[in-house]
């Protein structure tokens, strides 16, 4: 359920109610209090956020606190995130507030285009939401901002549209601020001061501390323009105190600029330069901001005050190119007025008069009467410099008359001094004397000793505060460095733990063992009340891991968030009294399953815990996928071994048939011949032609020879049958046997010798006699079969006779080296590097399945307890070397 719309600001009484509601609790109440405190007490607002409701409003509180602390980039990123979430939720109020924060960020940066876009978007969204109070507040604040760009246009557009007052104190602050700026820029300083003062008090009461600081500086500015420096210094002191207490560097910079200007007008030039330079340093990251333009303007006037017209001219020319000046008519007037003053100092009178006329025209269009009379005085100085005292006197008198017409305005002493000089040049000595006396009296009243003491006290206090701030800054840096070091050590320890856990998980090839380890490691790293893993089976169904629960399918899941996590492949963190975390287990784009965790309390899974769990989930996904792949390979390996055994049995049967065919055929031929001869003898004895002694003896010899041939053939067949019977018994045995290697290899490889001969190749066996080995004959035979068949299938070149050799020799350390070599095509380096990999073959679809040599490697290394290496050069044959123990493990 979305959080109800929160007011932009609250009164002190409303804040007390929020404090009561949030006492000791969290959720929406903590969020509402944090939102109300974001400008009153940013540190406390941030303390409340961890127990506040997660969501875009919470992000917006943090973003505004970051903006006030000067972290503009971080604030903008978080603001955009909140804006997108508000948009997804169709929350127009939230979007309006996010856009309004964008306006404040653009104001701090001096980005005029972004500023205007943000204000227009905020007003449109506030109107869409139907929140009349928000709409009026944003409209009045926008009107004030537009006054600084073009007072005349803003007055024409907004003065009739905004009400004079509002019963809502939050909106009344914005309305009073707008009216005060309008009156101050029109030089109606008494009314401006009244509006600013009322707005300042209401801003403090409603928690608008940022606006309160700006209002205090504007009051100081209004009193400065009215030449009431004592009051100006007092208000600048209050603004500095508020900004210093809040610790907001951007607003502190504004206070420094306005205080520096007050000190400049009091004649404290060194102190003024120090504050203005510090202001520029504070805003070094936002060169386009308006406060930077103000500080540069005051510094340019200061150059003129010390008599350096050339430096002043350069400063005012640079000021005229500043983005904030180009976007604001009031600053353009200031820049032209300053240029005229600097050009006058350099006696470039025509250029000075042109700049002064531009400033006067713009000031009159904007109805800025205070600035108009100052420019009139400047034009009079230019006429005096030309020697036209009469025209100069007319301009001075016009300026003084306009000054007298302004309520509460004290004419600048410089106007009276200029008028006195003009009277004197015309020979009007008594008026000149009177004007000079008025100027002295006005200057003394404006720059009283009390005001000077206050200005020096402010400057001294600023220096003390700056020293304290620097000391505190160093202390915080040390603390931050210590915290960063501790955080790095903790992160290093966590990374080491995760690395060890990752190695442990991925080393396992049994899925149940992987899940057991995962449960142990997750419980050791984070707080867990419920643990579950749901795996995706071959049918793309989500099934719980052992002991995790009953069958759970995406379509009928009692917890639809589980299906959502699996479907969207992204983690979900749900907070409702406790934390429920659903995290996909995936390898690349392949989903393996979902990890489901629930904590005992809310807020248990922060960014650190999520980072740890993401790493463990990644390791677990890889381990589970490896276990599945291993199971598939094991099944396929067993199938291939069975096929190899059948093939070997077929080859043995063919060999037996071939070997027995000769003796049995010879015996059959001899028996047939003897049978025919004995039948003929029988017929002659029964009455046929008489039988001579010599014929009888010859028949006897033939019979004896035939019987001898039959006897020898049957003995050969019997020997063969006995040998094959012994081999079959050994093939069926999985027990370790002690056997003589040479004899065993000749018997075992006999079928392959015949197969090689049929293919036009030779298979040589070169093994010394009496080389005994105690090992697994069945597995050794399988390994040799694979190697010889591999040479016949892959090594030999078609149509070219080749030679395969099987040899053995004794090595020190009770080892026997068995080698299978061929003089065939050999292997490239890439093939040689991967020759023992499962499913790697250069002849898929042509008799190769990619598992033969992998099985051979497994038999030699895991069963026979030996080692196997392959050596080959393309075009020069291959050699497989098996180093086997004489006694298998």
Image (tube, helix red, strand yellow):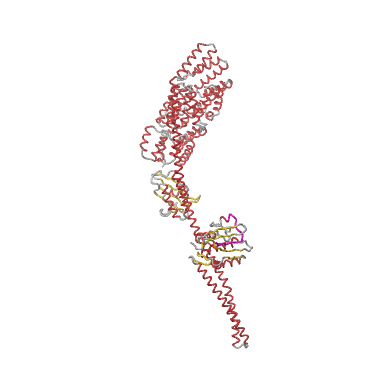
Placement of 139 over or under 445, stated as above or below? below
Q: Would you say 789 lies left or right of 232 here? A: right
Residue 407 appearing in the image: no
Q: Would you say 334 lies left or right of 581 here? A: right
Is residue 827 covered in magenta? yes
**Furthest residue in direction right, as rendered:** 800
Closer to the camera in the image, 288 or 206:
288
- Count every numbered label the image shows and give the total: 0
Placement of 309 over or under 748, stated as above or below? above
Residue at horizontal 50 percent and vertical 12 percent from the top = 433
Placement of 565 over or under 747, stated as above or below? above
Closer to the camera in the image, 867 or 473:
867
Closer to the camera in the image, 388 or 278:
278
Give residue 68's quadrant in the image: top left
Quarter of the picture holding the N terminus: top left
Is residue 731 covered in magenta? no
Percent of width and height locating residue 758? 61, 67
Percent of width and height locating residue 10? 40, 33
Closer to the camera in the image, 518 or 551:
518
Residue 559 appearing in the image: yes
Placement of 493 over or under 708, stated as above or below? above
**Furthest residue in direction front, as rendered:** 812
Percent of width and height locating residue 23? 36, 38
Give residue 42's quadrant in the image: top left
Percent of width and height locating residue 55? 43, 41
**Magenta highlight range:** 816-831
């Amino acid at each position: 359920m979305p959080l109800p719309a929160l007011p932009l600001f609250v009164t002190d009484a409303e804040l007390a109610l929020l404090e009561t509601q949030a006492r000791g609790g969290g959720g929406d109440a903590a969020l509402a209090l944090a939102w109300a405190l974001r400008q009153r007490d940013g540190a406390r607002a941030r303390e409340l956020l961890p127990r506040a409701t997660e969501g875009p409003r919470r992000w917006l509180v943090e973003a505004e606190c970051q903006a006030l602390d000067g972290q503009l980039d971080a604030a903008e990123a978080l603001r955009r995130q909140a804006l997108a979430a508000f948009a997804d939720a169709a929350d127009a109020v939230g979007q309006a507030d996010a856009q309004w924060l964008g306006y404040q960020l653009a104001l701090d940066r001096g980005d005029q285009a972004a500023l205007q876009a943000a204000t227009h978007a905020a007003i449109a969204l506030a109107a869409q939401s139907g929140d009349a109070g928000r709409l009026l507040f944003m409209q009045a604040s926008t009107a004030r901002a537009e006054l600084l760009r073009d007072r005349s246009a803003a007055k024409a557009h907004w003065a009739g549209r905004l009400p004079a007052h509002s019963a809502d104190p939050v909106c009344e602050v914005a309305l009073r601020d707008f009216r005060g700026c309008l009156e101050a820029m029109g030089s109606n300083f008494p009314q401006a001061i009244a509006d600013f003062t009322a707005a300042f008090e209401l801003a403090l009461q409603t928690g608008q501390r940022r606006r309160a600081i700006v209002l205090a500086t504007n009051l100081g500015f209004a009193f400065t323009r009215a030449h009431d420096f004592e009051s100006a210094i007092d208000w600048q002191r209050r603004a500095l105190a508020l900004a210093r207490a809040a610790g907001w560097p951007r607003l502190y910079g504004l206070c420094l600029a306005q205080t520096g200007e007050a000190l400049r007008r009091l004649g404290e030039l060194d102190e003024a330069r120090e504050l203005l330079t510090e202001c520029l340093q504070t805003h070094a990251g936002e060169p386009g901001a308006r406060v930077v333009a103000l500080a540069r303007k005051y510094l340019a006037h200061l150059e003129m005050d010390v008599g350096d017209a050339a430096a002043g001219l350069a400063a005012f020319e640079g000021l005229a190119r500043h983005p904030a000046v180009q976007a604001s008519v009031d600053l353009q007037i200031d820049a032209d007025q300053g240029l005229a003053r600097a050009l006058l100092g350099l006696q470039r009178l025509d250029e000075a008069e042109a700049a002064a006329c531009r400033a006067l025209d713009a000031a009159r269009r904007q109805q800025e009467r205070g600035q108009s009379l100052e420019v009139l005085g400047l034009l009079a100085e230019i006429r005096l410099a030309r020697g036209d005292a009469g025209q100069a006197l007319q301009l001075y008198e016009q300026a003084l008359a306009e000054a007298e017409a302004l309520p509460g305005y004290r004419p600048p002493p410089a106007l009276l001094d200029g008028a006195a000089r003009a009277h004197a040049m015309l020979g009007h000595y008594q008026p000149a004397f009177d004007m000079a006396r008025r100027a002295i009296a006005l200057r003394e009243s404006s720059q009283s000793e009390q005001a000077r003491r206050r200005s020096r006290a402010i400057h001294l206090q600023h220096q003390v505060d700056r020293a304290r701030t620097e000391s505190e800054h160093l202390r915080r840096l040390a603390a931050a460095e210590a915290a960063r070091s501790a955080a790095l050590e903790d992160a290093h320890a966590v990374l080491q733990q995760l690395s060890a856990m990752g190695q442990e998980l991925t080393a396992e090839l049994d899925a149940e063992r992987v899940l057991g380890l995962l449960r142990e490691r997750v419980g050791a790293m984070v707080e867990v009340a419920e643990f579950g893993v749901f795996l995706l089976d071959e049918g793309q169904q989500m099934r719980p891991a052992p002991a995790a629960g009953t069958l759970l399918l995406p379509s009928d899941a009692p917890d639809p968030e589980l299906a959502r996590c699996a479907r969207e492949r992204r983690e979900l963190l749900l907070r409702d009294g406790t934390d429920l975390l659903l995290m996909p287990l995936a390898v690349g784009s392949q989903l393996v399953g979902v990890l489901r965790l629930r904590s005992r309390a809310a807020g248990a899974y922060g960014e650190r815990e999520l980072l740890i769990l993401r790493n463990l989930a990644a390791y677990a996904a890889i381990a589970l996928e490896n276990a599945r792949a291993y199971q598939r390979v094991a099944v396929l390996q067993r199938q291939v071994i069975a096929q190899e055994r059948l093939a070997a049995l077929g080859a043995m049967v063919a060999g037996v048939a071939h070997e027995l065919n000769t003796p049995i055929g010879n015996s059959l031929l001899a028996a047939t011949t003897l049978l025919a001869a004995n039948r003929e003898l029988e017929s002659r004895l029964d009455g046929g032609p008489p039988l001579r002694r010599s014929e009888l003896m010859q028949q006897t010899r033939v019979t004896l020879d035939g019987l001898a041939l039959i006897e020898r053939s049957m003995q050969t067949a019997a020997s063969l049958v006995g040998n094959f019977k012994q081999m079959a018994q050994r093939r069926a045995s999985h027990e370790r046997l002690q056997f003589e290697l040479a004899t065993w290899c000749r018997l075992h490889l006999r079928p392959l010798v015949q197969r090689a001969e049929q293919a036009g190749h030779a298979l040589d066996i070169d093994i010394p006699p009496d080389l005994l080995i105690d090992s697994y004959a069945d597995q050794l035979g399988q390994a040799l079969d694979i190697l010889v068949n591999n040479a016949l299938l892959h090594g030999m070149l078609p149509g070219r006779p080749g030679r395969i050799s099987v040899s053995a020799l004794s090595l020190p350390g009770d080892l026997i080296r068995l080698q299978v070599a061929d003089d065939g095509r050999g292997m490239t380096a890439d093939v040689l590097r991967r020759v023992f990999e499962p499913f790697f073959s250069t002849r898929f679809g042509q008799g190769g399945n990619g598992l033969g040599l992998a099985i051979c490697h497994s038999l030699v290394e895991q069963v026979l307890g030996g080692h196997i290496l392959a050596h080959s050069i393309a075009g020069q044959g291959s050699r497989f070397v098996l180093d086997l123990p004489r006694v298998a493990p």
